[in-house]
Amino acid sequence: MKNIIRLFAIGAVAFTGVSCEDFLSADPVNRVSAEAFFVSESDLQLYCNGLLESYCPSANTIGMGDSYTDLTASKSGTDYYKPGAAWDAGKQTGWDVGDWRSIRRANIMLRDMVRAKENVSEAVYNHYEGVARFWRAYFYYSKVKTFGNVPWIDHVLDVDDALLYAGRDDREYVMSKVLEDLNFACTYCSTDTKTYKNVINRWVALAFKSRVCLFEGTYRKYHKVNPSTNQPWNNKYESADDFLQEAVDAANTIMTEAGLKLHNDYHALFTTSALGDINEVIWYREYKTSDGLNVWNDLTLNYNTSTASQKVSPTKALMNMYLTTDGTPIESDQVPMSKEFEGRDPRLSQTVHAPGHEWTYGGVTGPKPLNFTHVVTGYMFMKWSQEFENNYTTGRGDNSVPIFRLGEVLLNYAEAKAELNNGSLFQEDWNLTVGALRDRAGVKNIWPEDTANYKPDQWLIDYYAQAEGAAITNLSNTILEIRRERVTELILENLRVDDLYRWHCANLIALRDTEKGWKGVYLSADEVKNGMEFNGYTYTFTAADTNPNNYCIGTSMSDNNWTLTDGDHGYLVYHEDLRFDERMYVRPIPSAALSLNTNLGQNYGWEQ
């Protein structure tokens, strides 16, 4: 890959003194637009491999992407949600030279690949144009999620291009162009997964399209205004229902034509290096420490250390999302932690450390302990953990990471249909999607509109009723169950924050299940006094004790302290004061960018 990296080498650009044209027109030092390049299929492949090398999501991007949500506690949160951090345009990044270079690279390929048109077949040419347009859509989707309105740039800018000093384009226009790029990629990218294995192909493009269109369709349904302007959507291009239908169509194409099927071992999806052998996986980041490929990740280390991560921990709210195996919600969550996994959706014990879970450490295989220096709620994640000593001491995990898989596509289809035209999901659709996932997990499949057998979950109803956004109330049982399934199937796969933002529920990140912290395990008065037994170990809750198996529970509700909700017993709460307000659905345009181009304008609510 050294030649690929060298091909994309960029001259270092100091931030101070950078001009507006530098932000959007920085060329590679070794110009790939030279006349000798982009003239053959191998040139197109080389350039696309470079894009893949540079922009394929990493293990931490996917596996640690849910570190700051309503359902996962962390050591100290993130500054964006902290009341005392005073987040503003001066702290915001994301508009620097490097942040626009990705879009420029896609545009360079689209401009210069015409040189190869006479040298490759029409199918090959269209495939690679589809790949370039996939990446442009990929980059723009991230920009829109972050900033809302952004400038749409579909060509390589010259130093005197008027767009360098123009304002931002309306989000609806930009997303229409993103959809146009994705439709091209979904039409012309190859379906040949032998020639184009684990690179951008038609199935990757369709999976991404289903995600993007579900996001934008539900975003516009649950947000009555464009958050960049606080003005109602104009629907000049696509409506919310248009995007939802596009999501349905894209997901349905994969479901009916790609030949994929759910893998029978859920946990293996996140702990094996051989994802290429699993027919559920559409695109993945490969990690391997054998056969000459010495590439590893540190996901196991990050979820099992007190020094290399944010101590990301499951919460009681996350635990409550999981059904029992008979397809009904739990009756009470005030039970000992050692009993909490009994009779539950097996994905719970494949995601959260449960009784009977073993590891190998010090050359000995035995019950794995909790370590309260690693977690803050009493619960500990295990979804991405490979339980071998080397992973805990050196961080050399070789589990490959799924980026798109059939499980998500099924849920995209189900939700888009359920939201489309205020509900067009029928029982046969449910059985093919949510029902199939529950069947795979070992959970009884109950259609939410089966009034004779379906049991509504009042906890789940009340949880989403806390959301402050418009049109949130009176969610149907079907919508609530799809949202539940997105948690139990997809937690820790970098989708929860996007889900909360598009549902207009992001205030739950700050509110959580309590006002001032994350709720953890439930402890009886006896457990607080004499200790909690779990997986063969005893854990204590003494204020003066600082050993790894003890929480120093007190009465202070200030940040980074533990209390109990009922004095000498109750839910463990780890305190961290957070806040969320309406303007935070989009980030401010960075001050540095505004100083170079005042025509960009600031997002609503972030004006100084």
Image (cartoon, helix red, strand yellow):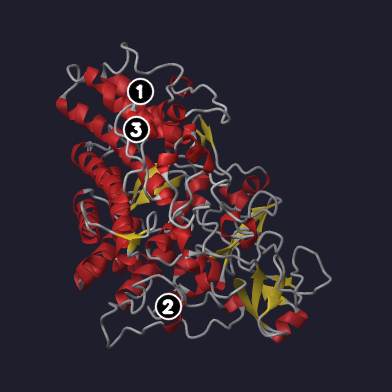
Determine the residue positioned at 36% across, 41% down: 167
How many numbered marks does the figure carry?
A: 3
Q: Which amino acid does the dot numbered 1 rest on?
A: Asp
Residue ID for mark 3: 163
Where residue 92 sits in the image (x, y, percent)?
Answer: 54, 46
Q: Which amino acid does the dot numbered 2 rest on?
A: Ala
Identify whether 20 is placed above or below 567. Answer: above
Viewer can see residue 476: yes
Camera-nearest residue between 261 and 213? 213
Determine the residue positioned at 21% across, 44% down: 183
Q: Nearer the viewer, mark 3 or mark 2?
A: 3
Identify whether 12 is placed above or below 581. Answer: above
Question: For mark 3, does the 10 Å Cα neighbourhood hold few (<14), some (14 to 19), or many (20 or more) residues?
Answer: some
Where residue 212 sits in the image (x, y, percent)?
Answer: 32, 51
Q: Earlier in the sequence, mark 3 or mark 1?
A: 1
Say if mark 3 contacts mark 2, CB within 8 Å: no
SS for tag 2? Answer: helix
Q: CA distance from mark 3 to mark 2?
A: 44 Å
Question: For mark 2, does the 10 Å Cα neighbourhood hold few (<14), some (14 to 19), or many (20 or more) residues?
Answer: some
Residue ID for mark 1: 158
Determine the residue positioned at 47% across, 24% down: 5
SS for tag 1? Answer: loop
Camera-nearest residue between 99 and 542? 99
Residue ID for mark 2: 465
Q: Nearer the viewer, mark 2 or mark 1?
A: 1
Identify whether 80 is placed above or below 183. Answer: below
Q: Earlier in the sequence, mark 2 or mark 1?
A: 1
Q: Earlier in the sequence, mark 3 or mark 2?
A: 3
Say if mark 3 contacts mark 1, CB within 8 Å: no
Question: For mark 1, does the 10 Å Cα neighbourhood hold few (<14), some (14 to 19), or many (20 or more) residues?
Answer: few
